[in-house]
Image (cartoon, helix red, strand yellow):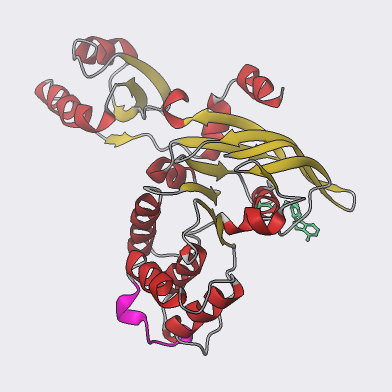
Amino acid sequence: MIEVRGLSRRYGELRAVQDVSFEIGRGEIVGLLGHNGAGKTTIMKMLTGYLEPSAGHIRIDGLDIAEQRREAQRRIGYLPENCPLYPEMTVLDYLDYQASLQGLEPRQRPAAIRRAVERTELGPKATATIETLSRGYRQRVGVAQAILHAPGILILDEPTNGLDPSQIQHMRALVRELAQDATVIISTHILQEVEAVCGRVLIMRGGRLALDSRLDAIGRTPRLLVTLEQDLDAVRSALTGLDAVTDVSLLDQDETLRRFALETPDARSAAPLVAKTLGERGWPLYGLEQERQDLEALFGAVTLERMEAAHV
Ligand SMILES: Nc1ncnc2c1ncn2[C@@H]1O[C@H](COP(=O)(O)OP(=O)(O)OP(=O)(O)O)[C@@H](O)[C@H]1O
C-alpha cells in the first residue's frame, strides 16, 4: 500500500536522502530509525506530499503522490515533528479548524472530532486552551488532528519526543491502539521506541536505507550481563547446565571483576535462575542486568553483508 522506489532528496549540495526503496503493507507498524540528520523527517515529508523528491516515486494505495497528491494525502494522517498548534485555541476549536482545513464537510465534523477526542483520550481537556496543556497532551492533540479524517495510514514524526516516561507509555499505547486499523510509520532515534511498538524497522544512516528487517529477524534477544570474581571456565561450568543459558562469554574485566554475557532465549525469566545458581555457589554477585543495546550496537550487529543486501 506504500511503495517507495529510488527516492532521493537534495538540499543544495547535501544529499539528505539517497536512493531509498521500500514497501509497506496494510496493517504494519514500521519504525523509521536513525540518528538526527539521517533523513527521517525528509522521507516523511515526501511520503506525505509536503516535499518533492529530487528523484524517485512514491505510491500510496497505487496513487502516485506527484500526480494525485490530494487524493493520496486524504489517505494519510501526519503528525509533523513540531506539530503547529495554536496556543490560544481550545482543543475542540483547534480540531474543528483542522477538520475544515482537511476538507471535512461541516456536518461530518462533530462525529469526526468526537471520535478523535475519544481515541486520544482528550475528553477531559476538550475545552481547555492548548497553551494550558502539558507536552504529553499537546502531542495527543497533534495525533487527534492526524486521525480526524480516519486515514488508513498514519505517519508520526518523533511522537514521543520531549515526553516524560509516563507520557511515553501513554503515547505507545495510543500508537498500538491506532495501529489496529491503520498502517503506522513512526520515526525515532531511540531503538527502544521501535522495539516497544513496531514489528519492522527501517534504519536510515547518512540518507541511505541501511537495513529493512522484521525486528524478530535481527536476532536481538537481549543477553544477560553478569559481573563476578570468577573466571570464564568456572562460570561456564556453573551456568551452561541451566536450560535458560545457552552460552557464556567474557565481555570485559578489570583487576578483580569480570563481566560475562549470557546467551539466553529469555533474559527476563533467566535472571532469577542465574542469581539462584550463583548464590548456591556462594559467589558474590556484583551485577546482573539485561543488556541494553543502543543504535550503535544494533548497527554493529547488522553484518556488512546484510547492509549491502539492503542497498540493492
Ligand atoms: N530545509 C532544509 N534545508 C537544508 N538542509 C536540510 C533541510 N531540512 C533538512 N536538512 C538537512 O538534511 C539532513 C536530513 O535531515 P532530516 O531532518 O531529514 O533528518 P532526521 O533524520 O529527521 O533528523 P532529526 O531527527 O534531527 O529531524 C540533515 O543534514 C539536515 O540538516
Residue at position x 33%, y 16% in the image = 248
Residue at position x 16%, y 31% in the image = 272
Q: Is residue 81 above or below residue 309?
A: below
Residue 126 occupies which quadrant of the picture? bottom left
Horizontal and vertical percent position of residue 276: 12, 27
- Asked if the magenta segment contains residue 28, the reply would be no
Give the mark count: 0
Q: Is residue 286 above or below residue 94?
A: above
Residue at position x 32%, y 16% in the image = 231
Horizontal and vertical percent position of residue 152: 49, 51
Of residue 33 and residue 76, the one placed in the foreground of this image is: 76
Residue at position x 32%, y 22% in the image = 262
Q: Is residue 30 above or below residue 41?
A: above
Q: Which residues are magenta?
A: 122-131
Horizontal and vertical percent position of residue 17: 75, 43
Question: Which quadrant of the render holds ligand 1?
Answer: bottom right
Of residue 38 and residue 214, the one placed in the foreground of this image is: 214
Residue 277 occupies which quadrant of the picture? top left
